[in-house]
Image (cartoon, rainbow, N blue to C red):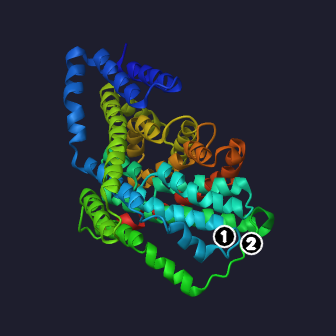
């Protein structure tokens, strides 16, 4: 049996294991080690298992993951995010569908601190959805807006998924993170525009909110939320101007968050304990999955399958757009069934050599990958963010209503994807200036 055949069989077995709900980390690692054993023998397999986990975890850029997670947990438990929705509401509620638009804006700001789509959807869902339902907003719009806007945590820096992508693609982590800024803002604007247009055409979706809000109230609420955007801008700005690497910016961001929360008298033993425990749990989960993906990439390299696929695609002389369309179909279909990190780590060992052979920019493709994963977070039947929102609203809104509500946002995301594919400079503008 040739090594390429072993690689193909390994991918098939891996997909089968994931289909029957074998934990992603175990599936990735076990298939990789067994495949290495078949191709190179027991000694090589044991050598990989003994050496590669340390080499991967000890990667300097990987230190950014726990630091960004810690920054988000301290900001949340320390109360820096509590006034985000209120601030967005006071400034945006007068627009058509203003509360839903405000929810989108608040999710975007929260995502910039947490870097987690699930955390964003869960936190904002508890605040924004009851408020929208109280004002008789359409339940599908109310729940769909938060479920979809929560996915912005995957793209707007600091994004944990983007850090992992950059490490596996061997591109600059700082440039990859900064590349997500404009596409993330564009995604939020596209969501808000779609909501406003729908509610303008059909006011019954979102009855107007009659409130007497003065400009003094609007400016006063900004005094409560200013530390968070300043913190995020400091982290992104330090990477953009080259003062800090991504890891140093992450550590500095975590330290600044502790200092800000302490100055606001929100730092106590409970906040520290909850933040650290949550960060450790999240980091351990992510690193185990990422380690499995790292082993898979090493096994794929030994099998020669990625190089073979790249050679075949290169020989077909396909236009780069067909390659991107093919990748889009693969990611969106997998997103219906698998976890975001698992999808990325499963596909990158094969995708990256194909992209390099086609001379496509890997940072630009990283932005597209994150957009694909965002869509997967709300796509039935598995859409994780939808189930997070369902757990928040309980029996008050049926699951089918939430899925119907997010369909408008999926269509909007596809339009955004078309724009990002058609105009790569949107994603590459800031990274190119950094060079």
**Quadrant in which the C terminus appears:** bottom left
- The picture places residue 279, in percent across and down from the top left corner, at 34, 48
- Characterize the local packing of mark 1: few (<14), some (14-19) or many (20 or more) Cα atoms within 10 angstroms: many
Say which mark, if any, is on residue 98: 1
Residue at x 43%, y 34% (from the top left corner): 346
Specify the quadrant of the image occupied by residue 192.
bottom right
Q: In the picture provided, is 146 more to the left or to the right than 140?
A: left
Up-down relation of residue 314 to residue 392 (above or below): above
Secondary structure state at the residue bearing disc 1? helix
Residue at x 72%, y 67% (from the top left corner): 197
Q: In the picture provided, is 356 more to the left or to the right than 128?
A: left
**Quadrant in which the N terminus appears:** top left
For the residues labelled 1 and 2, the Cα–Cα distance comes to: 8 Å
Total numbered badges shown on the rendered structure: 2
Look at the numbered discs 1 and 2 and tell me whether their residues touch, using CB distance below 8 Å. Answer: yes
- Characterize the local packing of mark 2: few (<14), some (14-19) or many (20 or more) Cα atoms within 10 angstroms: some
- The picture places residue 219, in percent across and down from the top left corner, at 51, 83
Mark before the other along the chain sequence, 1 or 2: 1
- The picture places residue 259, in percent across and down from the top left corner, at 28, 67
Specify the quadrant of the image occupied by residue 260.
bottom left
Up-down relation of residue 98 to residue 361 (above or below): below
- The picture places residue 175, in percent across and down from the top left corner, at 34, 60
User: Residue 19 or 140: which is nearer the viewer?
Assistant: 140
User: What residue is disc 2 on?
Assistant: 208
User: Is residue 68 visible to the viewer in this orientation of the structure?
Assistant: no
User: Residue 394 or 351: which is nearer the viewer?
Assistant: 394
Residue at x 20%, y 35% (from the top left corner): 54
Up-down relation of residue 193 to residue 318 (above or below): below
User: Residue 307 or 351: which is nearer the viewer?
Assistant: 351
């Amino acid at each position: 049996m040739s090594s390429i055949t072993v690689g193909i069989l390994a991918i098939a077995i891996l997909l089968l294991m994931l289909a029957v709900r074998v934990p992603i980390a175990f599936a990735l690692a076990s298939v990789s080690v067994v495949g290495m054993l078949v191709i190179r023998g027991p000694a090589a397999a044991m050598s990989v298992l003994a050496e590669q986990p340390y080499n991967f975890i000890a990667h300097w850029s990987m230190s950014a993951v726990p630091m960004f997670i810690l920054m988000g947990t301290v900001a949340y438990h320390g109360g820096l995010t509590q006034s985000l929705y209120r601030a967005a509401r006071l400034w945006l509620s007068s627009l058509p569908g203003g509360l839903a638009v405000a929810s989108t804006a608040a999710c975007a700001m929260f995502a910039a601190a947490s870097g987690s789509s699930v955390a964003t959807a869960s936190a904002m869902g508890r605040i924004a959805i009851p408020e929208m339902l109280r004002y008789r907003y359409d339940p599908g719009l109310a729940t769909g807006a938060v479920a979809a806007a929560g996915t912005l945590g995957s793209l707007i820096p600091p994004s944990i998924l983007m850090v992992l992508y950059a490490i596996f693609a061997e591109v600059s982590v700082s440039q990859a993170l900064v590349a997500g800024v404009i596409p993330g803002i564009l995604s939020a604007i596209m969501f808000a525009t779609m909501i406003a247009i729908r509610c303008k055409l059909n006011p019954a979706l979102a009855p107007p909110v009659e409130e007497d809000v003065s400009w003094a109230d609007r400016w006063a609420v900004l005094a409560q939320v200013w530390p968070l955007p300043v913190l995020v801008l400091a982290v992104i700005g330090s990477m953009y101007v080259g003062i800090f690497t991504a890891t140093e910016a992450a550590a500095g961001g975590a330290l600044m968050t502790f200092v800000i929360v302490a100055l606001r008298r929100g730092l106590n033993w409970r906040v520290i304990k909850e933040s650290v425990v949550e960060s450790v749990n999240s980091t351990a989960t992510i690193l185990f999955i990422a380690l499995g993906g790292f082993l898979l990439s090493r096994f794929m390299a030994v099998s020669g399958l990625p190089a073979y696929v790249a050679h075949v695609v290169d020989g077909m002389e396909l236009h780069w757009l067909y390659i991107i369309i093919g990748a889009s179909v693969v990611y969106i279909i997998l997103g219906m069934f698998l976890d975001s990190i698992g999808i990325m780590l499963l596909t990158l060992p094969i995708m990256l050599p194909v992209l390099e052979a086609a001379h496509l920019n890997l940072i630009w493709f990283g932005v597209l990958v994150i957009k694909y994963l965002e869509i997967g977070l709300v796509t039935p039947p598995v859409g994780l963010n939808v189930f997070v929102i369902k757990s928040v609203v309980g029996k008050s809104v049926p699951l089918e209503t939430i899925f119907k509500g997010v369909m408008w946002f999926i269509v909007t995301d596809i339009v955004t994807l078309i724009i990002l594919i058609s105009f790569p400079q949107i994603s590459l503008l800031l990274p190119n200036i950094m060079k």
